[in-house]
Structures are given as C-alpha cells and as structure tokens.
Image (cartoon, grey):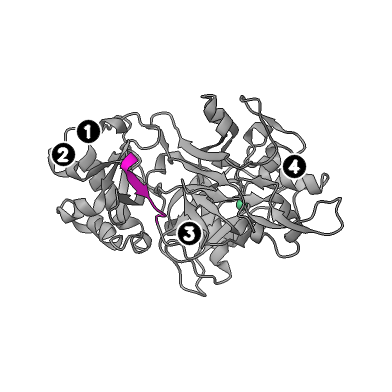
Amino acid sequence: MTARLDATHGADLTSWVASANGHPDFPIQNLPLGIVSAGNGERRPGVAIGDSILDLAGLAAAGLLPGEAGRFVEAGASGTLNAALALGGGPRLALRARLSELLREGTGERPAVEPHLHDAESCVLHLPAAIGDYTDFYAGIHHATNVGKQFRPDNPLLPNYKWVPIGYHGRASSVIPSGVPVRRPSGQRKPAAEAVPAFGPSRNLDYELELAIWIGTGNAQGEPVPIGSAAEHIAGYGLLNDWSARDIQAWEYQPLGPFLAKSFASTVSPWIVTPEALAPFRLPQPARPDGDPQPLPYLRDEADQREGALAIELEVLLQTPLLREKGLSPHRLGLSDARHMYWTMAQFVAHHTSGGCNLRPGDLLGTGTISAPDLAGAGSLLEASQGGREPIRLPSGEERRFLEDGDEVILRARCRREGFAPIGFGECRATILPAAVP
Ligand code: CA
C-alpha cells in the first residue's frame, strides 16, 4: 500500500540539471508535480527540478513519456491535475521513474529533454488542482492544547479530542497559491471590555502552519474508505497557511465553528510532493501516552500505525518591510515537525469518508496547525505571543503580537534522513495588504 523505496531514491543520484544537485527543495529525488505557465503561455503540467521547471506536456508531445507516464500528463492537459490525480499511484509512479531516467546525469536523452526546461523564475505557478472541497483538521495536539489552555487552563483538550479527528469544512473558493497577496479581512469583533460588537478591519490577524493533503482517487458517496486502503487515496502533500482573524473568530465561532475568520483566504504551496518522494521519510505513528484511548477499529490499521507518520520539519518565518529595508533576513517565528500530529493522514481519509461523505480528486485537506511542545515551535502567533500578551521582538527592533500590513509570512518544509538526499516543499508565502475601504 505505502510507497516503496526504489532506484529513484538513491542518495548518490545526480542530475545534469546542475542546480538540482544539493538543491534544498528540488533535487532529482523529489520531482514534485504542479501546474505552470511559462511566460504568458497556457497552463500545463510541470515538475520542479533544481531552479528549473520541466514542461511535461512538451515532453509528452515529443514522445518522451510513453505508456503510463504519458497517461498522467495527458490527463493534466486541461490545465489542472484533477483527472491526473484521479488515476491513483500507478501512472504517478511510472512518471516518476521515467523523469528520474530523463533527468539523470549521463543519460543520452538530455538533448531531447533540455528544450523543455524553463527557468523557474520566468514561470507562474498556479493551484495544482481545481479544489472542489477543502476540509481542515485539528490534529496538532500541542496547538490544540496551547489554544485550549488560553480558555480552559485546567482542561485544555475537550473530551472528544483523543477519540475523533476533529475537523470542519473550509472554503475552497478562497484557496490561493503561494505569492498572491492576502487582503486583511474586516468583520465583527467584540473585545471583552465592549458591550456590543463593531465592524472593522481585523486587529488580530494570524497565520497557521499546516500541511496540505491532496486527494487522488475519490470514493463514491455512501461508500467509506477503509483505513487499510486510505493512504492510497492521497496523491501528495504541500504547505498550507490557514490565515485566521482571531478577533473575528473569538466572537463568531460559537456554536458552529470558524466562518468568516478563516474563509477570506488560505494559501497553499504550488508543488505536490508525492507519497513516492516521501517514502524514505515515513515513521511509525508516535505511541499514545499511557491512559489515552486507542483509535477505534475503523481508524486503526497495523501498517498505518507502523509507517503512517511523516518526518517533515516545518518552519514559519516573518519578513517585514523594515527587516527588508535593513537587509536582515526573515525572522524565524517557529520550527515544528509533522511528527506532532495526533492522527495520521490515512486516519483523516478514513474518518472523513466514514459517514458516507465522498472525497473527490483534487480535494484539499489541511492537517490543522502543527506546533511543537515548546514556544519556539509555535505554529501560530496566537501561541507564540500567548494570545497577544507577550510581543515577539524582531531583530529590526520591531514587535509583533499579530500581523501588520506589509508583513510577509513564509512557510517552508524539509525532510532529512541519514543515507538519503534531503528534499523540501518549496515555499508557501504571502504578504498582507491593508483592508479594503468599506
Ligand atoms: Ca486551521
């Protein structure tokens, strides 16, 4: 069921695309998939290799992607990857194997491939799929605990947390790719000291450091996906910033959960990092502490418990106009890891479909904010500034409790393991624009 190690993972594998060798995100061992326009050209499937992007439609037209590998690219010819993701793991694996051959140092096919290579700087990266539905989970147990503590110091986690993968339905229409600026939302906010709410720009704008999960093959309505085959429905992963207006959220969230505090924008990284690329970085799901319940049978699978977690280092950085002006690098606000999830990705899929809901190719799931146990690993400002009480001091001399206009938030992710080439996810970044004048 789970992706296996093969020749494409060899640590000594190098590419004739020189920038790929030692590239922090996109060495030949990664090969993430996306939708790209070169210059003003049409949207086509592409793969990141070093500082370049390979046009897969061009390769296919040149006859370089026969069989199953070509099927994947053909299905993406419409300018979204939905139909390609729907094909499941076979064509994706075939494409990966073929691309690894074509990009390898020493291949005789370099002259045929090279004309289809573009400088990444000259390309526009789009959403990889037309997202029909977006669901956000809440699996980062330290985030859930830290946020819960602000409301219930003695009993931060609600009684359902360790039984049910908590989630809610997000808004798909406002999911945007990395690089598109985000406008500060306005809404109703009611500070505790005020008797009635007022409408205006959010004063407590925050980010959330999450992983994105792209659904591949879907399921029919009324036909749940068993936990044992749930991982096969995941086509890949990315980074997700679930922007959150905490003041609007605090007033509107009861009793039905987040609404306008989160629906104004969610930013995803444009590259789909495949389960195949992540095969070396699988881990056992961390053992639950003594006294915690075991997952109910519909969420428990031996193979998933043995290798259903991922070692992915997650980082969030802040760039302000003043930091940039002073020539200072973006300031790290948090360093966390995907290991801090209480539920596996397969458990999300099994739980989501367990009631009969149908997932469709290109649907997006968020993991929920993934924070480490310590403050240096906070995945949101709500945690890092402890509800806005403790400002974060930046090397520019500035302070932040929440985000200001002009601030840019950058998410990054990296996988490392002894004996394997490290790979990354590319960036998920966006700058905050001032609120629209009502
Ligand atoms: Ca979230």
Quadrant assignment, res 372: top right
Residue under pointer 2: 110
Label 1 sits on residue? 16
Q: Is residue 373 above or below residue 260?
A: above
Q: Decide if residue 252 is on the left or right side of residue 356.
A: right
- Residue lying at the far bottom in this picture: please name it: 222
> Which circle, 3 or 1, is nearer the viewer?
1
Looking at this view, is 234 or 62 the one in front? 62
Q: Residue at x 70, y 50 (%)?
A: 246
The Cα–Cα distance between marks 3 and 4, rounded to whole angstroms, is: 37 Å
Mark 4 surroundings within 10 Å by alpha-carbon count, few (fewer than 14), some (14 through 19), many (20 or more) = some
Instruction: Give coordinates of residue 275: x percent, y percent.
Output: 41, 48
Q: Position of residue 171 (x, y in %)?
A: 56, 62
- Dot 1 alpha-carbon crowd within 10 angstroms: few under 14, some 14 to 19, many 20 or more: some
Relative to residue 163, is residue 280 drawn left or right? Answer: left
Identity, as a three-letter code, of the amino acid under mark 1: Trp
Q: Secondary structure at mark 3?
A: helix
Task: Residue at 33%, 38% (x, y): give it.
Answer: 29
